[in-house]
Amino acid sequence: MKRCFYLSLLFIGLGFSQPSQAQVSVSINIGSQPLWGPVGYDYVRYYYMPEIDVYYDVASRKYTYYQGNKWVTKSKLPGRYKHFDVYRTYKVVLNDPSPWRYHNNHRRHYGHYAHNHTQVILRDGDRGRHGRHEDRYSKKSHKKHKESKHNGRRNWDD
């Protein structure tokens, strides 16, 4: 009799229970590019900075560089780079695991970018395009364009 009573309670309890639905939303921004990263890449694992021969791991936010006779990974650059500006230096995007294993190839292929400071970075991406747009349509060039229009030449304002 007790057995039937407990079984009926169990079935009633199962009938009232609803399946639990758990949703977990974690927004940690793992792997998001730093503002000093170059514009134009959907996915980046590592940046190689040929100016200082350093790799930056986007996912872990750590630098890997050669120190002594081995590669070390740290969250900050060593003191010898305290005046180094990561916003100005050229960054090469690498998606290989452990790219420092191929460092000689990277140095050979990308070393000529060492003092190239023309790369547009994420922080300045919109401003960089906007600035060129303003220069292209400055008042001075617009005035020249109007003068040429009155000289009888066909151009984009006609």
Image: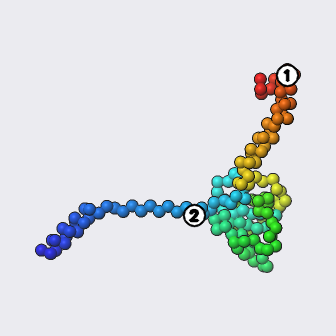
In this image, 34 relative to 79: left or right? left
Location of mark 2 (residue): 28
In this image, 7 relative to 57: left or right? left
Disc 1 marks a residue whose amino acid type is His
In this image, 73 relative to 112: left or right? left
Residue 91 lies in quadrant: bottom right
Q: Which mark is residue 150?
A: 1
User: Where is residue 37 shown, x and y percent of the image?
Assistant: 71, 58
x 26%, y 65%: residue? 14
Q: Residues within 10 Å of mark 2 (few under 14, many from 20)?
A: few
x 74%, y 45%: residue? 129
Q: Is residue 104 visible?
A: no
User: Residue 122, relative to residue 61: is it above or below?
Assistant: above
x 77%, y 73%: residue? 78
Residue 81 lies in quadrant: bottom right
In this image, 10 relative to 128: left or right? left
User: Residue 131, relative to residue 79: is it above or below?
Assistant: above
Element type at marker 1? helix
x 79%, y 59%: residue? 88
Q: Earlier in the sequence, mark 2 or mark 1?
A: 2
User: Where is residue 2 shown, x and y percent of the image?
Assistant: 15, 75
Disc 2 marks a residue whose amino acid type is Ile
